[in-house]
Amino acid sequence: MPNSYLNRRDFIQGLLAQSLLTGTMTTLWPGSLQAQNHSTIFKKIIPSTGEKIPAIGIGSWINFNVGPNPTLRKSRTEVLRAFFEGGGAMVDSSPMYGSSEEVIGYMLKELSYPQSLFGATKVWTSFEGQGLTQIKQSMKLWGIKKFDLLQVHNLVAWKAHLKILKTLKKEGLVRYIGITTSHSRRHNEFLEIMKSEPLDFVQLTYNIENRAAEKTLLPFAADKGIAVIANRPFSRGRLIDRYSTHPLPDFAKEINCTNWPQFLLKFIISHPALTVAIPATSRVDHVKENLSAGLGPMPDLKMRAEMAAYISSL
């Protein structure tokens, strides 16, 4: 057995000590984290407004990029139906994702535009003058008149596009604005933008193996009151494939975990700075499985350390 697991107690004690020294024990781990109705999906607060949002959303990069195929569109519509029926809200997309926005518009129409929809997309063009045109096209594809969240995708031409997003927010055409990255190498630049711009959301990669955001981005987001979306929660499915051959640890029963997607997602959404995780799926059973991670008790600081240590031991 690897040393990382043998030293789990030291790992936990070290994390607890660090939290006490930095003052994050009280600010990041309030008792209210456990005070939830376990029969409904776990919700987190968007700091800039106080609005609550379900902590499990859905991504659309590959799973909804199915073009005009009627059979695939029908199956994806059932996925989105199950998502909304299970208490989901945030649907995240981008013009980068092929036909996904068009397919989302088709599905939303088929589902009569669920009231719980939290529509989030991005502006993604290196041509600064095309940002507004692209956003309007996204609205047309989705079949909506305003987005809940618009983000600058991977910081492409971010200065020009953020200026547009701030204007649209003032005009009431978007409720929240933000930026995204999927690359740890951009974290320094990302942090500087977080410091200088009035952002409601940031989207970044965070999962139980890729925790680089814990160093600076998540603490700063918590301090400044910026909501955080975690993309690639399963590392494009790689984490599910890797750990599905291993048993869950015994302590997973304490947070009602019966499968690996629940375990991996509960680790993410239980971080106080995290607001929503957006796993992507093309299957109804998987979307139900993902949403179930938002039910039941959430891991506290000690258990999160145990979860990370167990993963390190595999």
Image: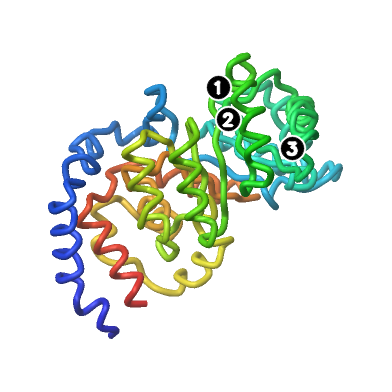
Q: Quadrant of the N terminus?
A: bottom left
Foreground of the two, 138 or 256: 138
Q: Quadrant of the C terminus?
A: bottom left
Q: What secondary structure is found at the residue carrying circle 2?
A: strand
- Numbered badge on residue 149: 2
Q: Position of residue 236 (x, y in %)?
A: 58, 61
Name the mark on residue 175.
1
Residue located farthest toward the bottom when viewing the structure as drawn: 1
How far is disc 3 from disc 1 in space, using C-alphas?
19 Å
Which of disc 2 and disc 1 is earlier in sequence? 2
The answer to whether the residue labelled 3 contacts the one labelled 1, judged by CB atoms less than 8 Å apart, is no
Cβ atoms at labels 1 and 2 below 8 Å apart: yes
Q: Which residue is mark 3?
A: 101
Q: Is residue 266 left or right of residue 187?
A: left
Q: Nearer the viewer, residue 223 or 69?
A: 223
Q: Considering only vertical position in the picture, is 12 above or below 180? A: below
The disc labelled 1 sits on which kind of residue? Arg
Q: Earlier in the sequence, mark 3 or mark 1?
A: 3
Residue 11 as seen in the image, left or right of residue 46:
left
**As shown in the figure, which amino acid type bears the numbered disc 2?**
Leu
**Residue pictured at 48% horizontal, 30% vertical:** 198
Amino acid type shown at disc 3: Glu
Q: Is residue 87 visible?
A: no
Q: Residue at x 27, y 33 (%)?
A: 36
Q: CA distance from mark 2 to mark 3?
A: 14 Å
| Residue 243 screen position, x and y as percent | 45, 70
Q: Residue at x 75, y 34 (%)?
A: 131
Numbered label attached to residue 125:
none
- Residue 260 x %, y %: 42, 61
Depth check, front residue: 203 or 255: 203
Foreground tag (2 vs 3): 2
